[in-house]
Image: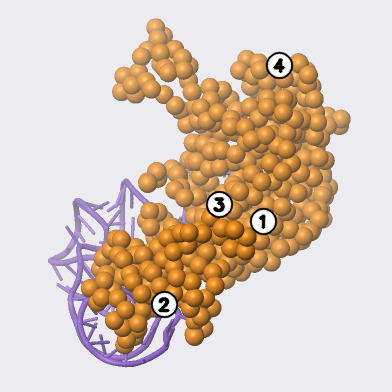
Chain colours: A orange, B purple
RNA sequence: UCCCCGGUAGCUCAGUCGGUAGAGCAGUUGGCUGUUAACCAAUUGGUCGGGGGUUCGAGUCCCUCCCGGGGAGCCA
């Protein structure tokens, strides 16, 4: 007989393991035990207030300890940062700030935290300082909220694709194609770097390395995803990606997570439709499931977060071709830091102008000059542009990049040659065009970029648990 | 990698013309029957990022290295 109980799996052990989140949903009078970490403690004569947080939701539970309810010896050890279990009765709170609170009958200390040197104070800290203590920053409001949002977002992403019959494919992390062209790669080797084996010509003898040739960490799973798309029709990757570029910016990481759907039989218009639905659906999910966390970001990090997200979730995305976009930028009469000319790449200032001022909503730019896009993008009939699409959103700029892939064997070969790449390692990529080739499309989305968009946090190092950047791989 | 700004108490910062170091917060102690970043009072706390130089004297000026932030390039 489990119906009606808010947490059926807790029946019979309700006082054993109840999270703060669950406790708020229980009825007044429930006898429960909460476990977590003390955020703060306030004393008055005869009464002590403890904020207990276990990460289950943004809000902590206020514990109220009347004089004598708990031995002084125990209460003394309840300090900011300490871990405790508190048993008591859920009661209505007579004061503002919370509907219910826990009237404490007993406290057990798990682990103390010396207040003299516990780094996390009750007051605000800079994000830069917290970044240096990544092992503790997750106990703060900002990072608690950020990683609950990240969890919800990843769940929403999987759900979005699974509900649409996409197959999740784990593309390899180690690759031997050193020419994916998406950026500098990390080498992977078991050779002795002090004294690598040499061939007769004096160069390093890679035949003696683990894979018999140079190997690297992947910079994209797209090419392998295409293999699966041409068998399962609709697939997506969701995994780590590595770039060895020495870029020190608030928008770049050496290790980040990327989502790359790939769909057979999809043309560019279908790709665009999916990208729009993807963004709206996942944003909606986070809005519905992380309200408390988003409200915190809206209040303390970026005042426009909620309005922007609600707007994006409801609006019909705009659409403009690259060629028309260039016209639009030119006739704006604005003084651009970077010149606007057909054939050049759109800069961040251009992208933001299009989404924030021309369309005032997300806009998809399509059909870029082939010279500024990757070799695998399908060439249009005009011979000058390719079926690429970038989704630009207000405040952030590009959030998704995608394209219809070149499915014609000979055209692809020509493009590869023009790009100055060696055909050989792509033999299997060409085979896909030789045997049962079909039109197909896909796009890529950086998880952390989307996290920045959702939270308003301005440094990408604050939306990944343990950021890896040039010179930094702590924790 | 390049350009700009910064590094002073556990945290956030001030420090004048080069003259020997200061605040708020937290910590500690005491007070207060319901607090919400509690409040009130007292109080501890410093190799001024590292190294070198100029000077009678350097937190302050010069050189250099390290670290952090912002911008650029590259991109997701």
Quarter of the image for residue A26 reads bottom right
Q: CA distance from mark 2 to mark 3?
A: 32 Å
Q: CA distance from mark 2 to mark 4?
A: 69 Å
Query: Which residue is tagged 3?
Result: A151
Secondary structure at numbered mark 4: helix
Name the outermost residue toward the front. Answer: A1
Quarter of the picture containing the N terminus of chain A is bottom right
Q: CA distance from mark 3 to mark 1?
A: 11 Å
Residue B8, compared with residue A166, is above or below; it is below
Q: Earlier in the sequence, mark 4 or mark 1?
A: 1
Subunit that carries the residue with mark 4: A
The numbered dot on residue A431 is 4
Front in this rendered view, residue A461 or A465: A465
Q: Are discs 4 and 3 both within one chain?
A: yes
The mark closer to the camera, 2 or 4, is 2
Q: Is residue A325 left or right of residue A154?
A: right
**Is residue A302 visible to us here?**
no
Front in this rendered view, residue A384 or A364: A364
Residue A421, compared with residue A3, is above or below; it is above
Q: Badge 1 local density, few (<14 within 10 Å), some, or many (20+)?
A: many
Query: Which residue is tagged 1?
Result: A285
Q: Badge 3 local density, few (<14 within 10 Å), some, or many (20+)?
A: few
Query: Which residue is tagged 2?
Result: A103
Q: CA distance from mark 2 to mark 1?
A: 35 Å
Residue B26, compared with residue A248, is above or below; it is below
């Amino acid at each position: 007989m489990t119906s009606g109980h808010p947490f059926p799996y807790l029946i019979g052990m309700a006082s054993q393991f109840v999270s703060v989140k669950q406790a708020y949903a229980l009825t007044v009078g429930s006898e429960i035990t909460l476990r977590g970490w003390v955020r703060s403690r306030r004393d008055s004569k005869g009464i002590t207030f403890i904020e207990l947080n276990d990460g289950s939701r943004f809000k902590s539970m206020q514990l109220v300890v009347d004089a004598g309810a708990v031995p002084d010896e125990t209460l003394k050890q309840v300090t900011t940062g300490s871990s405790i279990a508190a048993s008591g009765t859920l009661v209505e709170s007579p004061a503002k700030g919370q509907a219910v609170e826990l009237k404490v009958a007993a406290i057990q200390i798990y682990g103390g935290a010396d207040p003299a040197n516990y780094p996390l104070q009750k007051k605000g800290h800079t994000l830069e300082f917290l970044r240096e203590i990544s092992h503790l920053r997750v106990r703060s409001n900002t990072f608690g909220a950020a990683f609950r949002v990240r969890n919800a977002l990843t769940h929403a992403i999987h759900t979005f694709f699974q509900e649409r019959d996409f197959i999740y494919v784990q593309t390899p992390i180690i690759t031997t194609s050193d020419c994916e062209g998406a950026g500098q790669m990390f080498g992977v080797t078991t050779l002795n770097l002090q004294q690598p084996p040499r061939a007769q010509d004096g160069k390093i003898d890679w035949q003696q390395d683990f894979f018999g040739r140079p190997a690297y960490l992947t910079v994209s799973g797209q090419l392998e995803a295409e293999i699966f798309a041409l068998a399962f029709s609709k697939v997506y990757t969701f995994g780590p990606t590595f770039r060895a570029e020495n870029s020190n910016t608030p928008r770049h990481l050496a290790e980040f997570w990327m989502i790359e759907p790939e769909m057979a039989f999809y043309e560019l218009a279908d790709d665009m439709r999916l990208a729009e639905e993807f963004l709206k659906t996942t944003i909606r999910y986070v809005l519905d499931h992380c309200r408390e966390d988003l409200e915190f970001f809206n209040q303390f990090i970026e005042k426009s977060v909620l309005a922007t997200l609600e707007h994006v979730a409801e609006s019909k995305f705009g659409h403009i071709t690259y060629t028309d976009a260039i016209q639009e930028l030119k006739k704006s009469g604005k003084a651009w830091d970077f010149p606007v000319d057909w054939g050049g790449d759109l800069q961040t200032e251009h992208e933001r102008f299009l989404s924030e001022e021309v369309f005032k909503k997300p806009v998809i730019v399509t059909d870029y000059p082939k010279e500024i896009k990757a070799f695998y993008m399908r060439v249009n009939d005009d011979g000058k542009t390719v079926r690429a699409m970038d989704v630009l959103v207000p405040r952030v700029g590009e959030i998704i990049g995608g394209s219809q892939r070149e499915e014609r064997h000979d055209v692809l070969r020509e493009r590869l040659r023009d790009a100055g790449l060696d055909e050989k390692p792509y033999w299997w990529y060409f085979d896909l065009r030789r045997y049962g080739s079909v039109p197909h499309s896909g796009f890529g989305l950086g998880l952390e970029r989307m996290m920045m968009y959702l939270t308003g946090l301005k440094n990408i190092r604050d939306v990944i648990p343990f950021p890896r950047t040039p010179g930094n791989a702590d924790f």
